[in-house]
């Protein structure tokens, strides 16, 4: 049900992610061919929190930072790092 690299580098978080985050991304609008596919969003620590105004709002599970208006070529980890405050998740 998932593909992509890097998932297994976070085994202690993966079980949590698999249960809570992938389910939360079931309506994520970006698919293969994009940089911000759901598995990469999860790896960057995000869960999907769509609102009425924006279908692509995500929130970090650690710092609760919200990001939206994703472009297909956006890299979730880079976007996470660009927006302060520094997040504990990215230090893992
Ligand atoms: Zn964060």
Image (cartoon, rainbow, N blue to C red):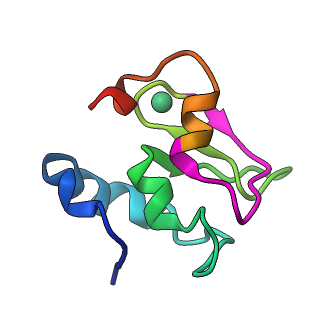
x then y, percent, for residue 35 = 60, 65
- Could you tell me which residue is drawn at 86 percent across and 50 percent down? 53
**In this orientation, which residue lies closer to the viewer: 77 or 11?**
77
Up-down relation of residue 36 to residue 84 (above or below): below
- Compared across the picture, whether 5 is left or right of 77 comes to left
Q: State the residue at coordinates (35%, 79%).
A: 3
The quarter of the rendered structure image containing the N terminus is bottom left
Q: Nearer the viewer, residue 7 or 15?
A: 7
Residue extending furthest toward the right: 53
Residue with the most extreme top position: 85
Figure label count: 0
Q: Nearer the viewer, residue 14 or 75?
A: 75
Q: Position of residue 92 (x, y in %)?
A: 26, 32
x, y (%) of residue 42?
Answer: 42, 55
Q: Is residue 2 magenta?
A: no
Residue at the image point whose x is 40% and y is 56% from the top: 21
Is 29 situated above or below 43? below
Range of the magenta residues? 65-77
Image-based side of 41 in relation to 55, left or right: left
Q: Position of residue 91 (x, y in %)?
A: 32, 27
Instruction: Report if residue 68 lies within the magenta region.
Output: yes
The residue sitting at 49% across, 49% down in the picture is: 47
Q: Main secondary structure of the magenta part?
A: loop
- In the rendered image, the vertical position of residue 77 relative to residue 30, given as above or below: above
**Outermost left residue:** 12
Quadrant assignment, res 89: top left
């Amino acid at each position: 049900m998932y593909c992509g690299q890097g998932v297994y580098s976070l085994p202690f978080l993966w079980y949590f992610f698999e249960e809570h985050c992938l389910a939360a991304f079931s309506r994520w609008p970006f698919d293969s061919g994009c940089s911000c596919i759901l598995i990469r969003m999860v790896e960057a620590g995000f869960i999907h929190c769509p609102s009425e105004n924006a279908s692509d709002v995500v929130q970090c599970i650690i710092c609760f930072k919200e990001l939206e208006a994703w472009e297909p070529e956006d890299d979730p980890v880079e976007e996470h790092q660009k927006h302060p405050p520094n997040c504990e998740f990215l230090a893992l």
